[in-house]
Image (spheres, helix red, strand yellow):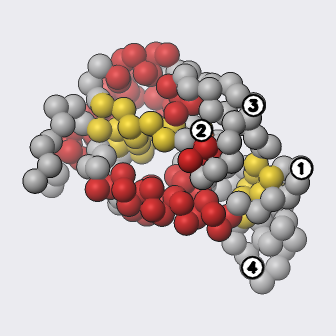
Amino acid sequence: MPRMPERPRVGISRCLLGDEVRYDGTHTLDADLVSTLGAHVEWVPVCPEVEVGMGTPREPIHLVAGANGVPSADARVRLLGVTSGTDWTGRMHAWARTRAEALRQLGLSGFILKARSPSCGIRDVRVDGDERSGRGLFAQAIVDAMPGLPVADEDELHDPAARRAFLTRVLAFRRGP
Ligand code: SF4
């Protein structure tokens, strides 16, 4: 049986750690978040867009309602290159399912996701051609693979009290029911 790590394992979108993995080769380091929570958890960094093979730098992508943005019988939200229209939907769904299952087996106790990203965003992600907002494809795979997992984006964790509450949820999830 694998030994339980000393600190709970928490997944995090890599760009929040300061890794230069965004489409334009920049990062979105959240220094407060990383230094305060980082003292209590073991980070498990993931960048879906790099790991699925898009490379850095890369064309930005967006979520679009219906097939190639045209409302149709295929109502599935698609993940497309903003300029080229390259369709990443199938590749991202397949990769995300496999990666989320591997993360479940690693015993994750929480996940902090980059707000509003078409891959990582947990809520309020813009979906072009649709009045509703959506969720990033990787974020959805995480929620599907690990029901009840404490999940938040960095916007929800700016406040120190919110960070403490998130850590409490992480520790409770790790202990189990
Ligand atoms: S938001 Fe997610 S996919 Fe985009 S750069 Fe950050 S980790 Fe990678």
**In the picture, residue 43 is in which quadrant?**
top left
**Residue 74 got which mark?**
4
Three-letter amino acid code at disc 2?
Ala
Query: Residue at horizontal 85%, vertical 58%?
Result: 85
For mark 1, does the 10 Å Cα neighbourhood hold few (<14), some (14 to 19), or many (20 or more) residues? Answer: few
Quarter containing the C terminus: bottom left
Query: Residue at horizontal 60%, vertical 52%?
Result: 52
Mark 1: C-beta under 8 Å from nearest atom of ligand 1: no
Three-letter amino acid code at disc 1?
Thr
Which callout, 2 or 1, points to the residue nearer the camera? 1
Q: Is residue 131 above or below residue 25?
A: below
Q: Is residue 40 left or right of residue 117?
A: left
For mark 4, does the 10 Å Cα neighbourhood hold few (<14), some (14 to 19), or many (20 or more) residues? Answer: few
**Distance Cα–Cα, label 4 vs label 3:** 31 Å
- Image position, residue 92 (x, y; %): 61, 59
**First along the sequence among labels 4 and 1:** 4
Q: Which residue is mark 2?
A: 115
Q: Is residue 44 left or right of residue 126?
A: left
Which callout, 3 or 2, points to the residue nearer the camera? 3
Quarter holding ligand 1: top right
**First along the sequence among labels 1 and 3:** 3
Q: Which residue is mark 1?
A: 83
**First along the sequence among labels 2 and 1:** 1
**Residue 24 got which mark?**
3
For mark 2, does the 10 Å Cα neighbourhood hold few (<14), some (14 to 19), or many (20 or more) residues? Answer: many
* Tag 4 and tag 2, C-beta contact below 8 Å: no
**First along the sequence among labels 4 and 2:** 4
